[in-house]
Structure formats: structure tokens, C-alpha cells
Amino acid sequence: MVGKLPPEKKLIIAGMPHTSNWDFILAMACMKSVGLKVSFMMKKEAFVWPLSAFFKYLGGVPIDRSSQRGVTSQMVDWFDRNENVWLGMTPEGTRSKVSEYKKGYLRISKAAGVPITLIGIDARSKEVVLHEEIWKYTGTNNDEDNAAIKNFVDANFFGINQRNQ
């Protein structure tokens, strides 16, 4: 792991590229090795005995995807209820190759008033790269910001399974 994260009380950490099943294991190992607690969203159906306690220990936040309130609203409430929390998200939403990222991480960030920073995997150098800077929104809308983040990631990070990037 190289770099450091910004000293924010609340933060969305966008981790990319997400190209392999190993990404989650690598991220959890890195975080645990330096004592970081980063939460992540998971469908509420996964939080059943005996896995519920384990997922919560790892930082899992149960999300009701069928709720009329929507995921963004649920996460805004979660940020409002918690004082010091970081939420990790993978904007691809899948390990497969995508032409553009999903925009939920941007919607949550803007609705909750929580900044975004980037963490990238560089499989060439075997590093997880932490960025201390808060991502500055570059566009007038989520499409422009999303494209700018994807362009930055594609130019600077290299996934474990390169054909899925």
C-alpha cells in the first residue's frame, strides 16, 4: 500500500479497477493490516445467521434494494446517523469490463455532502495506491464527473485481470 487517505471524518472511497474476485480480499487485507475500518454496501438478504455478525464485523451495511426509499436515500440516512464513517464502493458494479461506471457513488456523495477519494490497484507494480486528495468535481453533471474519473483510472491503474478493465 502506498500513499495515504485524506483526514476526513466521512468519506466515500471509490476503489478501482474492480476486475477480479481477489480485489475484495486484497482490499480487506490491506485495510485490516493498517487498522482501517471501511464499510461497504451489501444486499440485506446476505445478513442472515451465521454470516450477519461476520459481515458487520468486516464493515457491511445492509441495503434494501427493493425499498421505495432507494439506495441513495438509505446511504444518506446512514451517513447522517454515523459520526466517523468511510464507505468503500466499486463504481464498475461488476468485475466484468464496462464502458462506463455506474453513478451511484456520485449520487450518494452529492446527496450526503460527503467527499470522494480514489484508491486504485496497480497490478503491474503490485501496489494499492491511496490518494490523499479529495476528488474535485470536474463537470457540471454526474456524466461528466463519471467520465473524468474513469479516464483517470484507466490512465493510472491496472487491474489484476487486465482483460476486464
Image (tube, rainbow, N blue to C red):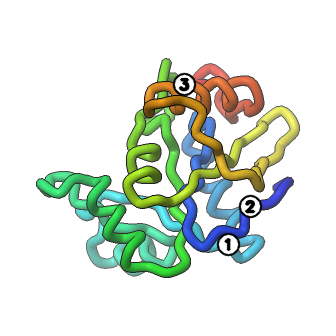
- Image point 41% across, 60% down: which residue? 112
SS label for mark 1: loop
Badge 3 local density, few (<14 within 10 Å), some, or many (20+)? some
Relative side of 98 to 71, left or right: right
Mark 2 residue type? Leu
Q: Is residue 122 above or below residue 51?
A: above
Mark 3 or mark 2: whose residue is earlier in sequence: 2
- Residue type at mark 3 is Ala
Q: Which residue is mark 1?
A: 36
Judging depth in this view, the residue of 158 and 115 nearest the camera is 115
Label 2 crowd bin: few (<14), some (14–19), many (20+), radius 10 Å = some
Placement of 112 over or under 116, stated as above or below? below
Label of residue 147 in the image: 3
Looking at the figure, which quarter contains the N terminus?
bottom right
Vertical placement of residue 37 versus 14, above or below? below
Residue bearing the label numbered 2: 5
Q: Earlier in the sequence, mark 1 or mark 3?
A: 1
Q: Would you say the residues marked 3 and 2 are in contact, meaning their CB atoms lie under 8 Å apart?
A: no
| Towards the viewer: 29 or 40 | 40
C-alpha span from label 1 to label 3: 29 Å
Residue located at (77% from left, 55% from top):
132
Image spot of residue 80 (x, y percent): 38, 74
Q: Nearer the viewer, residue 26 or 138?
A: 138
Contact between marks 2 and 1 (CB within 8 A): the answer is yes
